[in-house]
Image (spheres, rainbow, N blue to C red):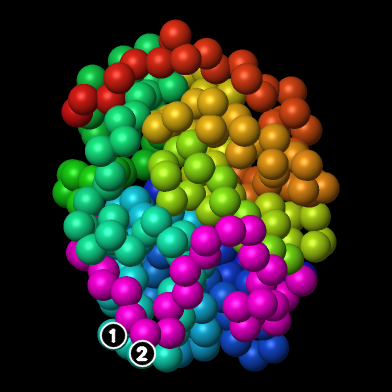
Amino acid sequence: MEIITIKLSFTNCYLLPVNDNYVLIDTGYDYEWKLFREKLFEKNISVKQITHIILTHHHDDHAGLLNNIVSENANVKIVMSALSPGLLEKGENDRTHGGSLVNKRVDFLFNFKMLYLSILLKKKLDKNTNLTFPPYKIRNGDILIHEDTNLRDIGIDIDGKIILTPGHCVDSISILLDNKIAIVGDAAANFLQFAGTKYCVIFITDINEYYSSWEKIIAGNVREIYPAHGKKFNVKKLVKNIWKNKPENMVLFTK
């Protein structure tokens, strides 16, 4: 199966072809609607061809365009963790479960805010990024994932399954395809390696849960990891780096 990458300013979204339609994984920030539309146009894909959106979690850089897409394609079904609806209705990244930056070097970078990160990453990060997004209210037809679930069981004609992968946040889910590809949202990342992230995303709610989710992904017999941030990589990177970031080195996120 061809995995189509929709690379937005900061987030990788993915399209999975299903007959003449597509399943979209994640949506990007709310201010990226024009860019998102342009990326689809470049690939000769219409918003109305998207039958399902699998939301890996509720954060602003993943859920920001839900309302835009639904307003243009009322038939699209949003697939999400059973823990996501209340978080999406609030319209902000959940902080009630705590969370920390993965190490002191990442915390150092955050102290310089968006300007410093923009220089390091050689890309512009929008000043409006503030961990909020347009609230989304679940609709009839949207699909809640309570446990590991085969895609065909929820009407998606693809061989694979959705698994629960908490740790980055409580409602994190990942997609394991039978062709040995895992699309993981922020359950892993290939981003800021120079700062010692070791394939972790920079913000983690529970590091033990996070690495337990890695174990689950590794056990899923996958070969390649497609993250929301950074380039795809071999699952051997997870095997090599699992449990390398220590809880005692993390810095409480209070920004």
What mark, if any, has residue 71 been given in the picture? Answer: 1
* Predominant SS of the magenta segment: loop
Q: Is any part of residue 108 visible from this angle?
A: yes
Q: Quadrant of the C terminus?
A: top left
Report the number of discs.
2
- Secondary structure state at the residue bearing disc 2: loop
The quarter holding residue 237 reads top right
Callout 2: 10 Å neighbours few (<14), some, many (20+)? few
The reply to whether the magenta stretch includes residue 152 is yes
Q: Quadrant of the N terminus?
A: bottom right
- Secondary structure state at the residue bearing disc 1: helix
Where does label 2 land, which residue? 74
Query: Hey, what amino acid is under mark 1?
Result: Ser
Callout 1: 10 Å neighbours few (<14), some, many (20+)? few
Pointers 1 and 2 in contact (CB under 8 A)? yes
- Please name whichever residue, 128 or 38, is drawn nearer the observer in this view of the structure: 128
